[in-house]
């Protein structure tokens, strides 16, 4: 019997770009995935990752039914058994050791999943534990803290108005590889070229000449970890050269000009030797930015995951404000999402709780993940005895992975919500596998909030959830119900949620939002009639409405952020400190930084053959990039195996000699290391690479936020 092929209009969820996709199916098979040319936001653009959605759906190694670890290996079990077992095991651990003995870790796929975002919190609340961790503290935590303090909400993060800017300065970001990142922007290459074609400039400041730097108007190498110094000098230059243009913002931030006294000691001349960018270049960077008209300075991953990452992101925001480029078309602008969760979500508490061992503060109810291993390994009241892992692989993606690997072996119980047996989920007692992205409804709750243009798109599930499968939200609600019953609490509140489903919550947000379309409020029903999505226009100035502080003022929080200048001064300029620390490196060390590739997305696409295939000049993608000067110094040949050693560990991998890396710097990509006994994703294991987080140090943090320091790690190299 012949069946007709069907076309579905969905959204790629594998990065932040929200690209519309056209998925052709035949029965339960995916025939093809291409860009949706009628999607008003992405206009047909997709990157190579889109086809990986098919690979995830088809993957024979993907887990489709719950698994329990037994003496005879992994055994399939029913959903009812698995959910009952998980709830009762977590309950028993808490009864024996206290509510804080169960911890959770959430990976970044949760941000791309409306069910996890909207219904996962019911489960976390049912656990009652404050021991919560996530990928946030190895990534964008500084952005959240800056926005919480300045604008009153952790997720009110202004983003570059890339379509209208004349000067785009990128510090520690590579949007051609990441497709944006806290800047939801499909077809980033076209948009960057458009800036140049209208007479503008793209300027990249990075220790590596990345794919983005290759197409930029100019690129400047900077020594890892010195971005805060550069920005202090740039702000100093604004005042010194009378380039401050903040008149329109002074009504919202009346103390803004007080910044001058904090930067008085940080002239371009003073910081230049430490940054690697000379004095005249620093001054010209500022002058060119200020002469451009609308301009925006954007800092991303490389600017965040360093010892002064939070101060760096704060200074970036001040630089935009002082040049008049906050809430200005072509500058740094607030978004106006159609389904706005921010008014209904936590604004971001700071230091309400602290970790047991190192007394590290929580932000928005989460502890720094660098503290997780010690919280498991250190005995005493509150010791973590059980873990819930939600779509994460922290053994590969957080500092000192080998230590965390050993810690997981000590746990009494582990449950993983995942559809692979990964380096982390191999420790689980029970694995609860959710469906893949194309098998669940989707609306980008998070990334519409960071989009460079306002739009709305609802993507219904392409394949219905079978009786033997569950979505993430069904898993989390099922566990929450069971835990409440075990704790003697009524569970009838969940009846409404089962009926409403996450799409019902999105529908409420759309109907109560700011937009109407063709004379009626937005709704799920309306978006179903517009399967390609709806364009809602460019970003608009939004002050003071964008501010969540009650007084509708921007709180510059000098006492909080500028207090870190004493640590910075000691770190970079105190002779006694410099004589006794390896943070500023001697000639026997290189500074480690990470990097990304367009076809890989952290650790979780490496089981897709089409994402890991292909080499360049005979090298795998997981190499240690070093400059020819350093290769000659250490007598290293191209493709030669080298040993890279840090305080916490060592890895062996091939060298890649390239002048695209700054002398004194070494770059190893993030997300590899598929060589752990017990994991079960064969394609990834055929391309194992090494984990850069076998080298990063869990004891070195950005003290202002608790964010991990993944860049600027001192390492030595030797011949393998």
Image (cartoon, rainbow, N blue to C red):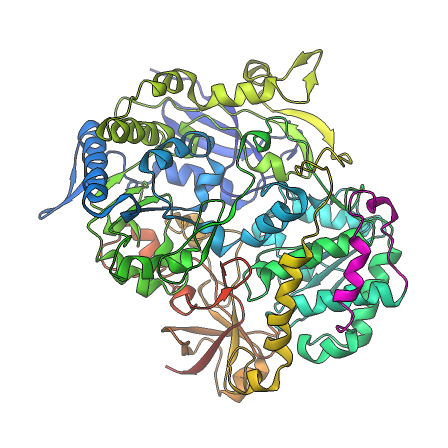
The outermost residue toward the top is: 519
Task: Indicate left or right for 398 with 665 as reference.
Answer: left
| Frontmost residue, 26 versus 305 | 305
Q: Quadrant of the N terminus?
A: top left
Indicate the quadrant where residue 432 lies. Answer: top left
Going by the picture, which residue comes out furthest to the left? 71
Q: Which residues are magenta?
A: 242-266
Q: How far across and down, in percent of the image, does residue 494 sit?
A: 35, 21
| Residue drawn at x 64%, y 80% as measured from the top left | 573
Give 613 or 438, whichever is nearer the viewer: 438
- Give above or below for 83 relative to 577: above
Q: Residue 420 magenta-drawn?
A: no
Query: Horizontal and vertical percent for residue 607?
Result: 36, 49
- Above or below residue 689? Residue 662 is below
Horizontal side of residue 320 vs 145, given as left or right: right
- Prevailing secondary structure class for the magenta stretch in the rendered image: loop
Q: Is residue 601 visible?
A: no
Q: In which quadrant of the rendered image does the C terminus lie?
A: bottom left
């Amino acid at each position: 019997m012949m069946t007709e092929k069907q076309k579905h209009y969905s959204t790629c969820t594998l990065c932040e770009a929200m690209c519309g996709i056209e998925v052709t199916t035949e029965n339960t098979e995916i025939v093809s995935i291409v860009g949706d040319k009628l999607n008003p936001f992405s206009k047909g653009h997709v990157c190579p990752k889109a086809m990986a959605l098919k690979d995830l759906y088809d993957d024979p190694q993907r887990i489709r039914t719950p698994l329990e670890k037994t003496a005879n290996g992994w055994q399939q079990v029913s959903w009812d058994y698995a959910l009952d077992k998980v709830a009762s095991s977590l309950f028993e651990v808490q009864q024996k050791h206290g509510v804080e003995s169960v911890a959770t870790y959430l990976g970044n796929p949760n941000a791309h999943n409306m069910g996890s975002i909207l219904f996962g919190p019911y489960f976390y609340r049912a656990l009652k534990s404050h021991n919560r961790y996530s990928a946030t503290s190895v990534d964008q935590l500084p952005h959240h803290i800056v926005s919480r303090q300045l604008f009153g909400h952790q997720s009110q993060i202004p983003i570059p108005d890339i379509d209208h800017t004349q000067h785009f300065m990128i510090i520690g970001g590579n949007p051609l590889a990441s497709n944006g990142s806290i800047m939801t922007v499909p077809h980033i290459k076209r948009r960057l070229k458009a800036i140049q074609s209208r007479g503008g400039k793209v300027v990249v400041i990075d220790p590596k000449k990345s794919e983005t730097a290759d197409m930029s108007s100019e690129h400047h190498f900077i020594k890892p970890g010195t971005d805060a110094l550069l920005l202090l000098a740039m702000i100093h230059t604004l005042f010194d050269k009378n380039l401050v243009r903040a008149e329109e913002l002074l009504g919202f931030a009346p103390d803004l000009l007080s910044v001058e006294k904090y930067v008085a000691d940080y002239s371009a001349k003073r910081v230049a030797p430490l940054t690697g960018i000379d004095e005249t270049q620093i001054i010209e960077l500022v002058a060119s930015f200020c002469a451009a008209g609308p301009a925006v300075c954007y800092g991303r991953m490389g600017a965040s995951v360093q010892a002064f990452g939070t101060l760096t992101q704060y200074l970036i925001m001040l630089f935009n404000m002082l040049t008049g480029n906050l809430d200005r078309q072509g500058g740094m602008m607030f978004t106006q999402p159609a389904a706005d969760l921010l008014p209904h979500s936590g604004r971001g508490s700071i230091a309400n709780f602290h970790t047991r061992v190192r007394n590290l503060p929580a932000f928005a109810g989460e502890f720094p993940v660098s503290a997780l291993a010690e919280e498991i390994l250190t005995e005493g009241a509150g010791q973590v005895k059980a873990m819930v892992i939600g779509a994460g692989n922290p053994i590969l993606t957080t500092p000192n992975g080998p230590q965390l690997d050993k810690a997981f072996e000590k746990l009494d119980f582990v449950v993983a919500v995942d559809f692979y047996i990964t380096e982390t989920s191999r420790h689980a007692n029970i694995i609860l596998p959710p469906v893949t992205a194309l098998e669940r409804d989707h609306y980008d709750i998070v990334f519409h909030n960071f989009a460079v243009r306002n739009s709305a798109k609802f993507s219904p599930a392409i394949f219905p959830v079978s009786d033997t499968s569950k979505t993430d939200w069904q898993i989390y609600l099922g566990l929450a119900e069971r835990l409440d019953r075990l704790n003697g609490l009524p569970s009838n509140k969940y009846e409404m949620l089962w009926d409403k489903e996450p799409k019902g919550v999105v529908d409420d947000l759309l109907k109560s939002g700011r937009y109407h379309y063709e004379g009626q409020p937005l709704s799920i029903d309306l978006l179903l009639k517009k399967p390609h999505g709806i364009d809602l226009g460019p970003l608009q100035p939004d002050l003071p409405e964008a501010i969540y502080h009650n007084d509708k003022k921007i709180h510059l929080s000098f006492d909080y952020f500028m207090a870190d200048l004493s640590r910075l001064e000691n770190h970079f300029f105190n002779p006694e400190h410099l004589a006794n620390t390896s943070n500023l490196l001697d000639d026997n060390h290189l500074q480690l930084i990470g990097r990304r590739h367009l076809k890989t997305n952290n650790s979780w696409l490496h089981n897709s053959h089409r994402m890991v295939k292909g080499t360049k000049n005979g090298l795998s993608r997981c190499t240690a990039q070093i400059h020819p000067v350093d290769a000659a110094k250490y007598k290293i040949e191209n493709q030669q195996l080298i040993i890279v050693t840090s305080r916490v560990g060592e890895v062996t991998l091939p060298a890649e000699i390239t002048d695209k890396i700054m002398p004194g710097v070494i770059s190893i990509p993030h997300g590899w290391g598929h060589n752990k006994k017990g994991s079960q994703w064969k394609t990834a294991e055929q391309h194992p690479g090494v984990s850069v987080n076998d080298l990063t140090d869990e004891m070195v943090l950005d003290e202002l936020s608790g964010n991990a320091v993944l860049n600027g790690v001192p390492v030595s190299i030797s011949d393998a």
